[in-house]
Image (cartoon, rainbow, N blue to C red):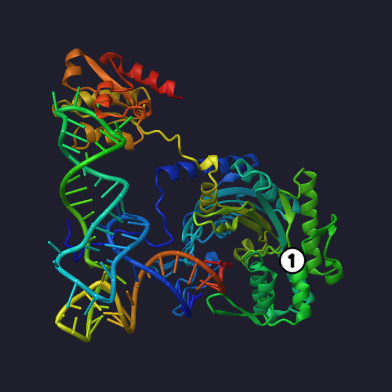
Amino acid sequence: MSDAKQRVEARGPRGLADRDASELAATGKMLETIRSVYELYGFEALETPAIEYTDALGKFLPDQDRPNEGVFSFQDDDDQWLSLRYDLTAPLARYVAQNFDALSKPYRSYRVGAVYRNEKPGPGRFRQFMQFDADTVGAASSAADAEICMMAADTMERLGVKRGDYVIKINSRKVLDGVMKAVGLDGEENAGRRLIVLRAVDKLDRLGSEGVKLLLGPGRKDESGDFTKGAGLDPAAIDTILSFSVGGPYKDGKPAFDLFGLLGKSDIGAQGAEELMEIEDLVRDAGYGFDRIRIDPSVVRGLEYYTGPVFEAELTFETRDEKGHPIRFGSVGGGGRYDGLVGRFRAENTPATGFSIGVSRLYAALKLVGSPIVSTSERVGPVVVLLLDRDRVADYQRMVSQLRAAGVPSELYLGGSGMKAQMKYADKRNSPLVVIQGSDEKAKGEVQVKDLVAGARAAASIATNQEWKAQRPAQISIPETELVERVREMLARRD
RNA sequence: GCCGCCAUAGCUCAGUUGGUUAGAGCACCAGAUUGUGGAUCUGGGGGUCCCCCGUUCGAGCCGGGGUGGCGGUACCA
């Protein structure tokens, strides 16, 4: 007990969730599924630490104006800045550069773990969350990008997301840059406005084309009255950008937007478009249709290190919360090509492409739609041996040991309460069976075994307590020597 | 960061124009039942009414400031 004035409030920081047994079991199943797909594609495991040197992550040092902006950082005892990783790609680039000569290229690896972002948390947004990442380093070919997209699609389906309920969207940073060049936004002096344009296009799904039009032009005022400054583009430029992003890539099987006419054949944007078409040809040849993988010119992705194709895995089905409001899951995975990231550590560039699944967010989405892979209804607790005669702890402990030796998860009740409370305890633990041996049974060399699930079923048709007690439903008496054998029989019958 | 809404028991909430000792349902614990999880009945534990300052004879309620939560928006390398 503590003094009320000094008592510490038991609470965790926001955006950082505890995970109980059922959630761990469910995410464990998800992780095993993802791992099996990645390994099927020939990727090998790698683990890197949660902490990296800040400069290796590509972040400037935290400064006084904006301490820890976006990333959790602190100083080592030698004054060097350290940070918690905010994704699994930057640490991979560091690892590859550090072990470059020892790794066979292309280097294909996967890693899973918690990443950290110091941002405002919300529904489906956490400050610590789990990512499952796969990358091919050292392959410039579009085949590497296409493979990543196909693997992402396979993974979604193996996780129980039905075809049509998800889509892998593809776009290209080069194409986006080309479009902006076409409206006069090239050059170093327009870098800031290009960023505003990208951010605006990224909000198409949420704000619609009218909202984005405002953001590309004078600016937009939101429902709370807050004003967001726009890019200040002229109407013709806005029209060009929107017709590219909103128009969609296809019409009657042909590109709906004359990208090459806009960009010119030699432009870097045209090169990006060629790459997208290569990827598309490859996935179509492999049998992946528009319903699974398709080009979507509105995809942007926030990370600045992408240099070419970018990917986004999105759930397309709709769900409503308990108040009937539609819930938007957003993307549950993303990735792309980052040809410059390894090169930050080396004299020459190394091409690389990869994809990350946001496991925490995907778990929340699957949970909400009741997907079987995250259902935990059949979780079964241990057999509980009741503690009735306090001076016979050793006898009860021996029964538990025998059960455990036979591979039956089991435990001795270790609390101080009476029999009724012990039954409640077993019930709450979701125990399949309890083992009962009081002095009566001991004298006869017997034990009682009660099936709690069958007992609960029987209870439904029993109205009075006298009846309930007299019947002792689903409870049998057996010789003490047959305990292990009979318990195993009863458990086997349940499956 | 900016804007709005909200804050009473573990949870969901009620609480009169400012007036005794702040309530309900659910959950929890115990008894009815020497030794049986459900149901029923009875009883019990649990509250700095978010915090501080002010107004008042008197504040859960009114005023000011703060903190926290939720939503929108911005940011998300």
Judging depth in this view, the residue of A181 and A216 nearest the camera is A216
Q: Residue at x 69, y 56 (%)?
A: A169
Q: Secondary structure at mark 1?
A: helix
Q: Residue at x 79, y 79 (%)?
A: A236
Q: Is residue A117 above or below residue A287?
A: below
Q: Is residue A269 left or right of residue B68?
A: right
Is residue A413 at least partly visible in the picture? no
Q: Pinpoint residue A20: horizontal percent, then vertical percent.
A: 39, 46
Tally the marks: 1
Looking at the rendering, which quadrant does residue A14 occupy? bottom left
Per the image, the residue denoted by label 1 is: A246
Q: Is residue A128 left or right of residue A430?
A: right
Q: Pinpoint residue A433: horizontal percent, then vertical percent.
A: 33, 27
Image quadrant occupied by the N terminus of chain A: bottom left
Judging depth in this view, the residue of A46 and B8 nearest the camera is B8
For mark 1, does the 10 Å Cα neighbourhood hold few (<14), some (14 to 19), or many (20 or more) residues? Answer: some
Looking at the rendering, which quadrant does residue A97 occupy? bottom right
Q: Is residue A358 above or below residue A13?
A: above
Q: Is residue A160 left or right of residue B58?
A: right
Q: Pinpoint residue A203: horizontal percent, then vertical percent.
A: 64, 68
Q: Is residue A59 above or below residue A43?
A: below
Q: Pinpoint residue A57: horizontal percent, then vertical percent.
A: 53, 64
Which chain is home to disc 1? Answer: A
Judging depth in this view, the residue of B20 and A427 nearest the camera is B20
Is residue A404 at least partly visible in the picture? yes
The residue type indicated by label 1 comes to Val
Q: Is residue A253 left or right of residue A108?
A: right
Judging depth in this view, the residue of A308 and A433 nearest the camera is A433
